[in-house]
Structure formats: structure tokens, C-alpha cells
Image (cartoon, rainbow, N blue to C red):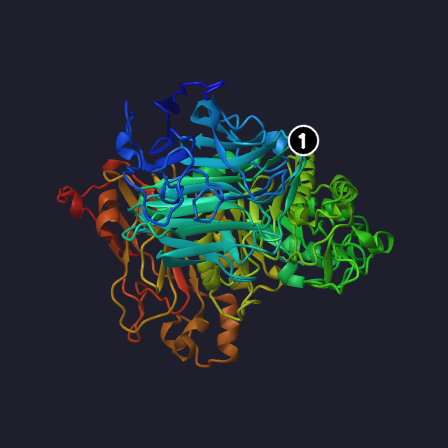
Amino acid sequence: MNIREQRYISMITFDNQVFHAQTNSTSYLIRVHPAGYLEQLYYGAKIRRAASYDALFEKITAVYGNTNVTPADSKLSLDNLCMEYSFAATGDYRHAPLSLQMPDFGYSGDFRYLSHRIYEGTYEENDLTKMPYAKVSPAHAQSDTATLDITLKDTVYPVYLHLIYTFFSKSDCVTRRVKIDNQSEGSIIVSKVMSLMIDLPDKNYNMHTFDGLWIKERHENIKKLVSGLYVNDSTTGSSSNRHNPLIILSRENCTEESGECIGINLIYSGNHYEAVEVSGYGKIRIMSGINPYQFAWTLDGNAAFYTPEAVLSYSSNGLCGLSHNMHQFVGSHIIPGEWAAKSRPVLVNNWEATYFDFTDAKLLKIARDAKNLGIEMLVLDDGWFGNRSDDTSSLGDWQVNEKKLGGPLKKLAEKVNRLGLKFGLWFEPEMISEKSSLYQIHPDWAVRIPGREHYPGRNQFVLDLTRQDVCEYIVAAVSDVLKSAPIEYVKWDMNRHLSDTYSANLQQRQGEFCHRYIKGVYEVMKRITDSFPHVLFESCSAGGNRFDLGMLCYMPQIWTSDDSDANERTYIQRGTSFGYPLSTMAAHVSAVPNHQTLRNVSLETRFNVACFGVLGYEIDITKLTKAEKKAISEQIIFYKTHRELFQFGTFSRTESDDNHVVWQVVSEDKKEAIVLFYQRTAMPNPQSDVLKVTGLLAGQLYEVETRRQYISIRQFGSLASQVSPIPITDEGVVQSVINKIYMLQSEKEQYRTYGDLLMNAGIKLSQQFAGTGYNEQTRVMGDYSSRLYVIKALPDDSLTDDSLTDDSLRMTALTNDET
Ligand code: DGJ
């Protein structure tokens, strides 16, 4: 034992056979059990280092009936030990993280501690894995990060299992993964290998998953853990819109702001699998890794297999505390290159404005109007290549349709640039249409099972990215287009699930298809993004079908959902926010009635929700009314003024009832914040709305002000004449004409108050419109309505009224007239 053992570096110590790793606020303890197994001792809030951790050892005094025991210790049953990794056929009847057929074809593998290494920084073999991984950017100290590589050896074969842990101090995250190193001469079949397994001593948790489908991704679902097995997985070939790889376990009393919780995510975009098993003894086992579904990897002699990296985080500061850890981790260790801290442009995308039906003239008109509104980039979506005028053809033919664009792409992009906008372009590189030149030449590149009927999705097929020649084609085709014109943004789409998975190249190794496919995707993404480091890449998969940490290692932002209805987005963006920061979520203002839900939500609320993310417009801006244009140009000025805050501020969800959504972003120095107050449906005579904020400085004086927004007169219907300063006698034509040029301004609330009041008491907001009476101070809300409140620190002498000496009373309401 203990060959090449190093005793400690500051973050990880090894004393008396116990590893103790500490991050800023957490501790992780593992014991090398005398019998060679790894016993999980503790994962949670930071505890001090001690000479002995006996208190944490499992105390076994006798064998429970009907259990199997270990060969070396006749009292020890692995079935009731908290373990770091477990093996089938060793008497532990909980689900095992590993399923191997060893060179003798037996389902075995009994691995015991051999040695370990501890070093600063991330895993030394990261680049060998050919997978995305968490990194330490030059801006962060290596000493904030430490790696522990524990080697276990099979008791029979020279087969080694490395459990690799990297601890990230500042974000309170630890990543885990496994390397199987087969140094035997024979092959091993790996049909399950989880990146992470951890047993915890009690089951008193709720499990949060983020589930959905197309246009309703990542809605939070919570279930209480009782005895049994809970699986969260995907089988679509992608991380999927059905079940995101992120899961959270929270204590019963855990709220957004307080209480304990643990989050688990996976840096992987293919089929994933997370399981939580509650054992008969009341312990829980958590696993995360590649889905064993249709997975079988032949690991030849003298070869190694690396799993993807899983991420684990603990917080005692509630679900928002956990999200803050995850956001910090994504921002510091996942987002690639310059985009980690670089603000993202406000764009207009032509998809919902034109779908496939556009010309260069129409695009330039959009660009011209966009410039006037303050938009910074035009993105040309699907339909610019081959003969694509609907979704039945041309995928794979990445040649510009010059007839449709009135000339080469360069010419169009330069015209857009001359109008003062950047130019961005859509691709779907992983796909092939049967109606395409590419298919004529390479029908064998489409993924299908020979001799069987095949199952198209959106009239298209997946390219076989397990093949090197296909990967080479994609890299060349996309790079050629990117080199041909000033393209500063790419939307990388992927619109169907994998099915009929088979590659002629793989022969009897078809169980490797899905994992090899996603490794092919990673290879082409890495090569292309490395070659064009200044291009902003946005990942998309029919909206949010591949919203995961793997994609984010190459592309800093993702199209969150094809659903841009603001009400639906409050669920989707909320669910996404548990694991992913706002800078990763593209969010657009689109037309009403909304194209996905047919819902009518006001222009201002569409903006107020979309600005909690990377803002864009996906609406025919050439058809906007004068009043709408005015509102949008003010929205964009507002967003640009607060862009850093919206994209990189500390985002929190605030506890609220089912009818309301309250989100906030706070700057790092806590001197600035913006709060969204969103109401789903209007209630007659509602109770007072109280606006509470978290994460401010208690003793800091702040000014709180409503963002000025516009209310359509139409919202009042036949009451319009009561509210409009311009007489309206007719609800039809006249109202419609006035509505185009004129909108009411919302009420304006303005307060000066201290942080402690805002955080503990909150502001009682102005009364909502409730049937009778209307004046400039009335908060006209209605269904699917919202306000933004801007909070700014003031110098302390801004409070001039000396009579207000008690801090808790220092709230001054300023009416519209006074301001
Ligand atoms: C699906 C995407 O999510 C949409 O935004 C759009 O790009 C279409 N594909 C284009 O086909």
C-alpha cells in the first residue's frame, strides 16, 4: 500500500488513512478502510482538521442476518457501509456504479486501495480524455484547486480503477470521475461506469429534478425520498429536454435562502444517468455518469477509459446558495476563453420574423431598423444555404444560396456591418437531409441500421460522427463558411434525437455508438471553436435539448428554449437557473400572440423576463408600431446600462407564492441590484405586494426606483376612455390607432432606504388596479404582468431629513410630483 503516497497539500490532507479535503466552506472525508475499501465518512459544511476522525467511522459490532460479509473481515458487510465506489458481487446489493466483464468473461471486479496522489491544479490527464472538463483559467490561482487521484487495484487482474477528485475552493465544488486502466492482456467489457458515486448516512432529503420536453424544458419537480430507486436519465443521445443532468437533494426545511442541499451535475452532453437509491438501512447512494442504456465499451488490453467529469456541490445557504456555487463554478471553470467575462451583444434573430421566407432586402431592412433601436447584431437563422426553403432539404450542403441572399455571404455580412451591426449565422452541422448533394455522394454517412426501416426527425438524419471522415468534413465545411465572411457569432443547432444508432465502422461494438458520437461532436466543436476564438458560439438543440455543462465548455451560451412566451419562460429560466448562470441563457423578446403558446403577454413583460439572461429580439421589428419602437429602444438602453449586472451579477430566486415570481441580480460589490416582480394572474382586491431583496449590505443606504415602462391602452378595453388623457370614445379603430402611437406610462415608485429594511421588512408596493379608480400611482398589472425595480447604493448623506434617526424607519416615499 501507499506507493507514491504524498501526505498533503494545503487543501487535501491524508493522515491516519483518512483523506480530508476542504474548500472554502465544505469538507469531504474518505477513509481507507483496513480491508482496503474506501469508506465515505462525511460530505458537508466545513469541519476542522483533527488528529482522529473515529467518530465518523461506521461502528460494526455484529453481522446483520441474511447479509454477505467480506473475505477479510467476517463482521463487515459492504451492504451497509457508506462507500465512495462499490462493486457488484461483493455483498453490496445496492445498485453498483460499475459493471465489468473481466478478461475471463465473469461479471466481477473487486478493487481495493493501492495508492494515491495529491497535487495542485486540475487532473493532469485532462487532455487525454478527449472530453470537456473543468479548467483553471489564467485569471484564477492554481492553488484554489487541488486534485486527489486514488488508485484501486483489482484483486486478480492488473486492472486499475482511478477515482479522481478535483476540489475547487472558491466555488465549493468537487468534480469526480473515473479512469479504468486495463493493464492486462485481455479485453474487458464495460457496460456501466459511473463518474461519481457517494453514499450518505441518511435519507431525509427531497430530490429536485429539472424535466420537460420541447418548448417546456427544465421545470423543477420535487419528490420526497422514501425507500426505493429514483432514476433521472436521458436516452435521446443528448442530455435532453426531458431530464437535465442536474439533480439536487435538499433537506426538508431547505428554502431558497437557508438550509442544506447538495447539487450534482455532469459535464456531458450525451445519454446521462443519475440515480438515488434509498437502502433498507436508510442510507442513500447517489450516482451520476454515462447512461448504461445501450452502452457497452470494449476496453482492450493496455488501454484506458475515462468517464466524463461529474460535479458535486454542497451548500448550507439554501438552494440559492447552491446555485451561487454552481454559477461561480460555471463562470470560472467551464465557460471557454475570452467569453467567461465578456459581455454579450443584444441581437435580433430573423427566425420567428421570417422563418424560411426572407431575401437580402428584408434582412437589410431588419438590420437598419435594428440599428435604430440600439440592437448590436443581426443573426441570420436557418435557410441561407443549399436549396433550403423549408425543413425538408439541404442540411449538409453548407454552400450559400446566393440567389436568396443576392450574392455572396460576404457581401451581405459587410452590408450589415456598414449599417453598424455585427453579423451572425446559423448552422446545423451534425445533420444531413436526404434531399441534399451531400446525401447523393455519401448516403452511408447518415446514421441508420442497415436492412431496417428508419425513423426520421424533422425530415432529417444524423451524420455519423463516430467516423473521422465525417468529422473532417464538418470541420472543413463550417470553417470555410466562417473564413468567407465577417461572421462574429454562430448559432450551432441540432434539431433531432438520435435513433437507429448504428455505424458500419463499429461492427460488433455498437454499444459504443452514442458515447463515440458525442466524443465526435466534442472533437469538431473543439477544433472549430479553437480556430475561431473570437467568434461567439451559441449552442442550440431545438431550443434547450442540450443545455448542459459539456456544451458550455465550448460554447458560452445556449438557446434556452424555442419557447419565448414570457410566462412559460418564468418556469424554464427559473429551472435552468438552479445550475446555470444568466450569462449562459439566451432569452428573446418575440411576437404576440406567442408562436408557441398563442399567449398575449405585454411587450414590457416579455422584456422584463428576457433581460434575466442574454437579451435578443426575435420579432419582425420592421412591423412594430411607433409606440412599440419607443418602448423597445428604451428597453435596450436599460439593458445595456445594466448589462454586466444581468449577465454576470449574482442571481437569486426569492421565495414567493405560486402566483408570483421574484428574481434579482446583485452586483459583486452589492451596490447595485435589479429585482423582477412578476404576477401570473390578477386577483380582485389583492393583498399588498411586498418587495424583499436579499444579498444587499445591511447598513448601506439605497435608492429603489421602478423602471419606467409602458402600458398599452388596449389593456383597459372599454375602460380606456377613463384612463387615457386623449379622449377615446370608440373601442375599435380609434383605440387601435391611438395605441400605435401612444402608451401610458407606468406608475413610478421611488424610495430611499437601508439594506436591512429591504432585506428584512421589504417595501410595501403601491396598490394594484382593482376595478375602481385609477391614477398615476396605481400599479396597473393584470395577468402575466411585471415590474423591474432598480436599486442603487447612495452616499450616506443623501438622507437629508434629520428627524429620521432610527434606521429601520428611514424610508421616504417620493411621489411622481416630487421627482
Ligand atoms: C430550432 C431552433 O431552436 C430555432 O431557434 C431555429 O433556429 C430553428 N431550429 C431553425 O430551423
Q: Position of residue 24 (x, y in %)?
A: 35, 31
In this orientation, does residue 641 appear?
yes
Q: Position of residue 567 (x, y in %)?
A: 45, 63
Residue at 52% in and 31% down: 155
Ligand 1 falls in quadrant: bottom right
Name the one closer to the observer, 627 or 311: 311
Name the one closer to the observer, 591 or 47: 47
Q: Position of residue 754 (x, y in %)?
A: 24, 43
Q: Is residue 209 above or below residue 83?
A: below
| Kind of residue at badge 1 | Glu
Residue at 62% in and 29% down: 183
Q: For this view, does 156 lie left or right of residue 641?
A: right
Mark 1 lies on a secondary structure that is loop
Q: Dividing the picture into quarters, in which one does residue 535 lie?
A: top right
In this orientation, does residue 581 appear?
no
Q: Which residue of the protein is positioned furthest toward the right in this rendering?
A: 441
Q: Is residue 195 above or below residue 731?
A: above
Q: Dividing the picture into quarters, in which one does residue 382 lie?
A: bottom right
10 Å crowding of disc 1: few (<14), some (14-19), many (20+): some
Q: Which residue is mark 1?
A: 185
Name the one closer to the observer, 781 or 213: 213
